[in-house]
Structures are given as structure tokens and as C-alpha cells.
Image: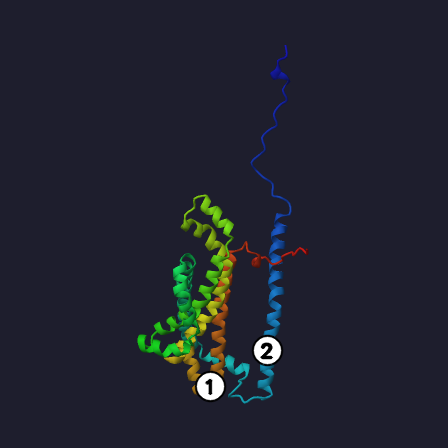
Amino acid sequence: MTTAQDVRPARPAPPTTTRAARPGTGARTTTSFRGRVVALASAAWRPALVLLVLFGVWWFVAWRELVPAYLVPSPGAVWETMVEDWAMLAEHTWVTTMETVVGFVLAAVIGVATAVLLVYSPTAEKSLYPLILFAQVIPKIAIAPILVVWFGFGAAPKIILAVLIAFFPVVVSAVAGLRSIDPELLEMSATMGASRWKTFRKIRFPGSLPQLMSGLKVAVTLAVVGAVVGEFVGADRGLGYVLLLASGNLDAPLLFADLILMSLIGVVLFLLVELLERLLIPWHASRRGNVVLASS
């Protein structure tokens, strides 16, 4: 006699735990890597070409002696100076870099904290914002001698000057970013019972990052200017001090080498902030290379 269990179809065997690699995975990874390399090369060749043209013009002017050598030295003379005086230049470059980084970090922390205070407190905004604007329009070169008198010839005046110059872009960008959040999103967060701190941590601050990072990229380059200006007024170390010595001695190769190192500090710090931006907001539209715009 046949039962119901006898006519049931046999269950298929469970799949094995070993998964075959999906076809095309390695090719897709290789293609992605090649695409990044191609994108980087396509983005870098134009500025590289401009630098090459400028270098060619510089070399031609020095070679033809269109300008006296004590005003525009040849690229070879600048390179020889950088090689011969590299130990001295590296020491002063480190001093200026340290002053710039410390000043920029302090400006970022104090600036973001000030922006949060201005956004969450209308009284603080009405009281402090005009003073911040007034302090920004004061020429920082006029403040530098006062800082030297107060804090001496050490690193403190240079760091404070870097903070003062880099502070304003951070505050303005952070205030604009914190206020750019959709009010309906904030109302929904309050309706769901989220505290101010949780709303700030989950909604306000992440939403303000695109504008804040733009302000930080401006501030990091201004911090270099602040540190160098502080070294102009009173210092015995730093690239600003070397610049004064080179100009006083009419040492054009050292002067150009010093300017190149100053520029490299600003460029490297800017690229580091750019990398931080890519890590923090990879979801933002500015970080997507190919954005398709739909025509209305």
C-alpha cells in the first residue's frame, strides 16, 4: 500500500557552501582601477601643462638674460641652492609647517564651536557676529607687532596670527552649512523625540560638512600666510625669516627656493583637506565625477 509520504518528491540537496567566483569580478576591479588612473591623468595633465609652460618661460627669460640674474635667477641656480642648503631649508620648513598646522587646527576647532554657538543662540549671534566681522577687517600685519610684544619671539605669535587669519572662513562656512539643513527634517527629528545633541550629531553636522569643508580648504591656505606674516615681524626661524634674509642679501636663488617651499606647504595641506573631504562626504554631489544633468 502506497502512502502519501511515498509519493512526495524528494527534496533537492542543499547547495554547497563553496561559491564560485562571479564572472567578471576581477575584470571589473581592474577596469575600476584603470578608470581611476585615467581620470587622475585627465585631471592632472592640464595643470601640469600650465606649469611646464611657466617653467619654460622662466627658463627662457633667465637664459636670454631678459631680466638681471639678481632679480630672476635661472631654474638651475634655484635647484643648486635647494640642494646645497637643503638641511637649513628643511629645518625652517618644518618650523613654518608646524606653526601652520597648529594654527589651522585651532582655527577649525574654535571656528566650528563659535558657529554652533551662533546658530543655536540668537543672542550670541547678535552680540558676537558684528565683532567677528570687525576683527576680520583689521589688517593682520598691524596686529603682528603687538603679538610679538605680548608673547615674545617664539612660535606663539605666529600660531595666533594663523588662527586669526584662518578663523573667519571657518566660521562663515560652518554657519552657512548648519543653517542649510531642511527645516522639515529638523521638525521631523523633534517630532520623533530626538534631543538637540542627537539632532546635531545625526543631521545638522553631517549636512553642514560640504560647506564646512570648503571653508576649511580656504582656511588652510590662509594659515600659511598667517604663519609667514608672523615670521616677517619677529622671528629667528621659519621660511618667513629666511625670506627676509634672502631679500636683504639680494640672494635671488634662495628667495625663489623659499617661495617654492612655501607654496608646497600650502598645496600639500590643501590636498590633505581635500582627501579628508573625500573620506567624510563621499556621498555628496561634488565628489561624484560624472554627474548627469537632466534637461527640463
Q: In terms of image quadrants, where is residue 68?
A: bottom right
Badge 2 crowding class, 10 Å Cα cut-off, few under 14, some 14 to 19, many 20 or more, is few
Secondary structure under tag 2 reads helix
- The residue sitting at the top extreme is 1
> Residue drawn 47% across and 74% down?
262
Q: Could you say which disc has been placed on residue 59 in the image?
A: none
Residue 277: horizontal and vertical position, in percent?
A: 50, 59
Front residue of 133 and 157: 133
Residue 235 appears in the figure: no
Q: Could you say which disc has been placed on residue 251 in the image?
A: 1
Task: Relative to 241, say whether 171 is above or below.
Answer: above
Task: Relative to 1, say whether 12 is above or below.
Answer: below
Front residue of 238 and 180: 180
Say which label, 1 or 2, has the lower sequence index. Answer: 2
Q: What is the CA distance from the residue labelled 1 to the residue labelled 2?
A: 22 Å
> Residue drawn 49% across and 46% down?
188
Front residue of 227 and 293: 293
Q: Which residue is mark 2?
A: 54
The quadrant of the rendering that contains the N terminus is top right
**Is the image coloured rainbow, by chain, by secondary structure, or in one colour?**
rainbow
Residue 291: horizontal and vertical position, in percent?
A: 62, 57
Residue type beneath disc 1:
Asp
Taking 120 as reference, is 48 left or right?
Answer: right
Residue type beneath disc 2:
Leu
> Residue drawn 39% across and 73% down?
161
The quadrant of the rendering that contains the C terminus is bottom right
Badge 1 crowding class, 10 Å Cα cut-off, few under 14, some 14 to 19, many 20 or more, is some
Secondary structure under tag 1 reads loop
Residue 52: horizontal and vertical position, in percent?
A: 60, 75
Front residue of 57 and 146: 146
- The residue sitting at the right extreme is 295
> Residue drawn 60% across and 71% down?
48
